[in-house]
Image: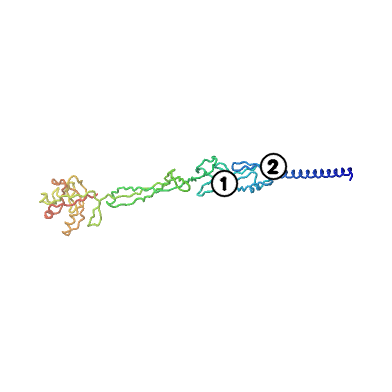
Amino acid sequence: MSSHRRGYAWARITLVLMIALIVAGSATLMLTQRLRSRTRQVTLNYDGYSISFQTFDTKVADILARYDIELGPGDEVTPGVNEALKDETSITIKRAMAIDVTADGKTTTVYLTGGTVKDFLDKAGVTLGENDLINIPLDTVVKPRDSIKVTRIDEDLIVETESIPYKVVTKKNNDLEEGVTRVISEGKEGVLERRIQVVYRDGEEVSRTVVSETVVRQPQDRVVEKGTAKFVLIASRGTKEKYTKAMTMRATAYTAGYESTGKKPGDRYYGITASGKKVKPYHTIAAPKSIPFGTRVYIPELVEFWKKRGVTISGIFVVEDRGGGIKGNKIDIYMEDESTTKIWGVRNVTVYILD
């Protein structure tokens, strides 16, 4: 082969090699550019750490899966787990706090990454009443291991009634026999209305306060008459007579006959008493000045005295006479004849002063 041909062949080989190198370089450049276009620069902020890296992953969820990061209740990830990754994406994971909220007899665990006490109550669905108490102020920022307790304060106004006893008013009745009572009007209890404010703490009563007391019905007195009159039974009549006083007296007997008075029937003043009345058997007695003329008295012993002699009398006598020896607790009973007065003699008798 001539030197001219050999030179031509190397020129062709060199050209081919140069073309091949150019083609390979272009392919490599294109591949590098394609790979660069698929990678993304990502920063992961998690548990206080910040890591930047490049990745071929396309979603936030892919990053979490790749690094075995599990999200618990209430945990927050930004952007969201289904968001697509872009270059220079910053992924932030915030862990939620588990806070117990106790109210109405039950405890609810609330998961939030942060917030005030009010935020946690809202999350738990707990609404505060006007008087309810809470262990941490509403605007306080909640910290891990805090627990929130709501104490329900309820108030109720109740009405109670109480009986007001009636009084018993006793009135004396001198026309009613002693020991006898008579109801004039029945008593009636009154009614006291009491308004009470009751405070409950979590359903249990803790206090009672009387707000007002009102008498809605006044009591009515029970009026009773009590007999003060003294009565003695007039056996011969089967009736009772009211008396004002009973006393034991020394009784003698007298007559209008000559032996006693020196006067005879037909004489001017025969049988005339100190009161001017004429004496009557079973009727007239002489009594001291302490017992006025005209006073009626009952002497049961005289009823018995005459009964034994076959005479029935009422036993009621009238003071119509006096006597020089009739003083103090002495009386003198008029009888028709001297013999009867002697039979009587002197005796103690019970004298009822009739009304």
State how the image is colored.
Answer: rainbow
Q: Are marks 1 and 2 in contact (CB under 8 Å)?
A: no
Q: Earlier in the sequence, mark 1 or mark 2?
A: 2
Give the amino acid at mark 2.
Asp
Other-residue count near label 1 (Cα within 10 Å), few / some / many at <14 / 14–19 / ≥20? some
Front in this rendered view, residue 124 or 74? 74
Give the residue number, with chain letter if any, for mark 1.
111
Q: Which percent across, then down, holds residue 352?
A: 21, 51
Q: Position of residue 342 (x, y in %)?
A: 11, 54
Q: Is residue 96 left or right of residue 350?
A: right
Q: Tag count in the figure?
A: 2
Dot 2 corresponds to which residue?
87
Q: Is residue 164 left or right of residue 57?
A: left
Name the residue nearer the viewer: 56 or 46: 56
Q: Residue furthest bottom?
A: 310
Q: CA distance from mark 1 to mark 2?
A: 32 Å
Q: Nearer the viewer, mark 1 or mark 2?
A: 2
Tell me which amino acid carries mark 1.
Answer: Tyr
State the residue in front, 332 or 178: 178
Residue 80: quarter of image: top right
Mark 1 falls on what kind of element?
Answer: strand
Left or right: 5 as drawn, with respect to 144: right
For the residue labelled by badge 2, is the local secondary structure a helix, a strand or a loop?
loop
Residue 268 coordinates in the image, percent (x, y): 14, 48
Image side of residue 184 versus residue 273, left or right: right
